[in-house]
Image: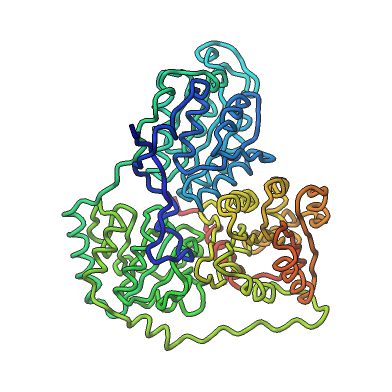
Amino acid sequence: MDTKIGSIDECKPTNGDVGSPPNSTVKTIHDSVVPSSAISVNSCDATLGRHLARRLVQSGVTDIFSVPGDFNLTLLDHLMAEPELNLIGCCNELNAGYAADGYARSRGVGACVVTFTVGGLSVLNAIAGAYSENLPVICIVGGPNSNDYGTNRILHHTIGLPDFSQELRCFQTVTCYQAVVNNLEDAHEQIDKAISTALKESKPVYISVSCNLAATPHHTFTRDPVPFSLAPRLSNTMGLEAAVEATLEFLNKAVKPVMVGGPKLRVAKACDAFVELADASGYAMAVMPSAKGFVPEHHPHFIGTYWGAVSTPFCSEIVESADAYVFAGPIFNDYSSVGYSLLLKKEKAIVVHPDRVTVANGPTFGCVLMSDFFRELAKRVKRNETAYENYHRIFVPEGKPLKCKPREPLRVNTMFQHIQKMLSSDTAVIAETGDSWFNCQKLKLPKGCGYEFQMQYGSIGWSVGATLGYAQAVPEKRVLAFIGDGSFQVTVQDISTMLRNGQKTIIFLINNGGYTIEVEIHDGPYNVIKNWNYTGLVDAIHNGEGNCWTAKVRYEEELVEAIKTATTEKTDCLCFIEVILHKDDTSKELLEWGSRVSAANSRPPNPQ
């Protein structure tokens, strides 16, 4: 007899573009029929650890990032025993969490496993970042022996109190569900609830598994798995119709409407629907910086990144002069609004959230899914290309930076002119917090090129672990990572893990002597860091094991030669290119953005 189990398929964009990633990289779960022989569970496999491993695989996880500790060792044994699950040992818990974050951006779900409290609190920062970026990361912790709960015993790896809930309380604010598995009777229910909640909410979850239970068989794990599925979310039909009618009334009388995609397009699984509306309406289409890569940049009406005063050329002029703008899943924080300096008016805005729509700062329609709303709107909206025609009239192609003279110190704008030529459908860009935000934002993504950065949380050092996870999730792509020297010093260790796993990333280490983004917000001696021999450090980590190639470049001709080597002779290598730049050589966008954010940070207290 055939038995249904859950399987997960990645949402594929109907327009075939990955420069606009899938509707959401979050997967959709559905039932599929699989022969029972493929899922039968032997008695020796009927343990909590193996059940958790099978559920992870069913959810879409084939690689899990880990750091061993005595509370999770037995659990790791049982996770490793799952043939479809690859255990990747990381150098520290923070990077394991960042790797799960990067993995989830591509696969739609990621997972990490650490030990109790000392591991849990170390990974907490990465989980908070995943929460802020709406990423379903399953954080698994090996917990205390089930017999120790409810006693007055004091355990190691704790703060010395018999209360074991400190770690749980910390995770409650940065996860959408917490499961403490310290008995077998309801373990399968707790695990299933946690994983399904992560996928439904697109947020991290916490699962603590008592160290003595992972290897223990139980009758709830011997039966064929219950079908693992999520009920689809549906719009309220009347609410959807009312929202569409109110929006059409507003948009169809506008003279020059525009569309702007925001970061919540991904969690709403609405990237394709957004493009459908752009096709039908003829509106000029832009993205907020944290939505770069969510829609195809080769779209005929794409006008660039809307980021207030640091937008791509001519984009802000078109958006801010529009008499109606449709914002899809926006987040207006102090960074994305350039210190709250956007010239937008609420009464001109249709703000579309994942599950509600607000029209012109007036009525809000709830229980309306973004994708449904855009598709209905696309069927009935009046075509209006005025804003794009205005953009086309005023657009002037960007000039090229001056070519460096032989042996002239390399400039950052010259560097990224060469980076642009490296991009293709077979590459993906990871941009670290710092000036790489602004330089990478100006790159024009070809069809199929991936792009990720962490704007909402902005944790320096994120990109090393995220690059590890993203590259592991999509081995067919070559990741180009752009990391500042200050950020690199925080998380450098897991270059080792990239080498152990045979990754072929190209890392550009921007060595300009400090925390440049912070210099432009507020300078001080604390922003200057000790210079390292970065290529020497990576060579030491390499230590003759794995494929690695390093280069240090100071001049344009050296950069050109290094890129040529990395993309021809060293395609099977992890390539590390240290780029020496002047400490004051930054993008003009960072200079403008930094001064405005500084002004926002230094506002005096309101009068009492």
Q: Quadrant of residue 250?
A: bottom left
Q: Measured along the vertical axis of the image, is residue 507 above or below residue 2? A: below
Screen quadrant of the N terminus: top left
- Residue 481 visible to the viewer: yes
Expressed as whole percent of the image width and height from the top left, the position of residue 90 reads 66, 40
Report the residue at 26% width, 68% height from top: 378
Q: Nearer the viewer, residue 570 or 595?
A: 570
Q: Measured along the vertical axis of the image, is residue 565 above or below residue 384? A: above
Drawn side of residue 132 relative to residue 591, left or right: left
Drawn side of residue 413 relative to residue 355, left or right: right
Expressed as whole percent of the image width and height from the top left, the position of residue 467 reads 62, 53
Residue ranking furthest to the left = 238
Expressed as whole percent of the image width and height from the top left, the position of residue 218 reads 45, 18
- Residue 523 visible to the viewer: no
Expressed as whole percent of the image width and height from the top left, the position of residue 71 reads 61, 24
Report the residue at 42% width, 88% height from top: 393
Report the residue at 72% width, 60% height from top: 509
Q: Nearer the viewer, residue 339 or 288?
A: 288
